[in-house]
Amino acid sequence: MRGTSRASLAAAEGRFEPVLREAGTQGRLLGEQLFALVDALDSSGSLRRTLTDPSAAGDAKAALVARLLTAADPRVVEAAQGLVRSRWSEEDDLADAAEHLAYEAVLASSEADGTIEQVQDELFRIGRALAGQREVRRLLYEDTVHAEARGQLVDRLLAGAGAPATQVLARRAAVAPRGRRFVATLGHLADLIAERRSRTVATVISAADLGTAQRLRLAEILGRAYGREMQVQVQVDPHVLGGLRVQVGPEVIDATVLARLADARRRLAS
């Protein structure tokens, strides 16, 4: 995605994430309904053009997508309306964004039921099992093979095992490859899981180790700030002199003495 689309997707994620935290395990249903929107967009060029037309009124596009999703959960309709009100560099970016939100919804449900690590491991093992199965990989991607047949092949590979999110995501990767090979989609999902899990782990660098009470208190504070339960991992580094450096995903909060000294030096030099 180019700049405009990336910004629109980031804004959509920001709006949808609190919804997913509130939805809990229902996120899987929201994701499946968003996949239906992706399918509708992929199957109709005129629909994509209409919903991404920058000259069309946002309210009109929002009303159209509401009619399209009549049977969908109101939270899905609201997310979709937010997407179509946004601007997109390319018309295909709208479907890509809807797919991204759908993946995030399913993964959020696995966070809620405590299986996200299991999902990560199961998707990895599926990809590894296919490493020497060239013909099976071809069948999972080949567009001459009916989508439902590809889905049934995944069902046989899973044999009824796996977390609910694993089953939804693996089947979706086969049924609707959207130009990606099956194993490549599994790799993409692995990246999303790693990114998602990093948001719940706060890496803390401190001059000295933190006690149990301090860790719990810091986890509580960060949990309130980020709106989700946080796990604190402490790394001791005497070079920071004092204070804490906290990283949650890409965000860094640096309150160490070393950082304050460096900032003072920059101010003096300016």
Image: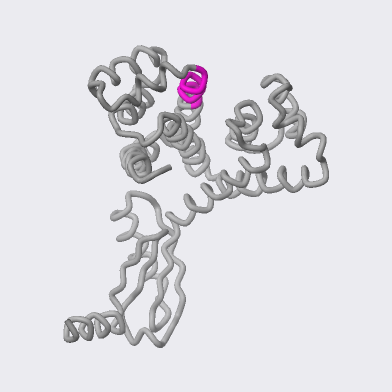
- In front here: 108 or 139? 139
Q: Measured along the vertical axis of the image, is residue 16 above or below residue 50?
A: below
User: Horizontal and vertical percent for residue 48?
Assistant: 41, 22
Query: Residue at left 70%, top 19%?
Result: 146
Vertical relation: 241 (above or below) 117 = below
Residue 71's image quarter? top left
Relative to 258, does residue 214 appear above or below in the rendering? Answer: above
Q: Residue 39 in magenta?
A: yes
Is residue 26 visible from the viewing direction of this image? Answer: no
Closer-to-camera residue (194/175): 175
Magenta portion: prevailing SS class: helix
Q: Quadrant of the C terminus?
A: bottom left
The answer to whether residue 151 is left or right of residue 197 is: right
Position of residue 237 in the picture relative to residue 164 (left or right):
left
The percent coordinates of residue 66 (x first, y second) are 33, 16
Q: Residue placed at 46% from the left, 19% from the top? A: 45
Residue 21 rendering spot, x and y as whole percentages: 38, 40
Q: Nearer the viewer, residue 61 or 230?
A: 61
Q: Quadrant of residue 250?
A: bottom left
Query: Is 194 colored magenta in this rendering?
Result: no
- Between 78 and 108, the one nearer to me in the picture: 78
Left or right of 234: which side holds 155?
A: right
Residue 84's spot in the image, x, y percent? 33, 27
Q: Which residues are magenta?
A: 35-43
Image quadrant where one finds the N terminus:
top left
Q: Residue at the spot x=79%, y=34% of the render?
A: 136
Q: Residue at x 61, y 40 (%)?
A: 185
- In this picture, residue 179 sits left or right of residue 70: right
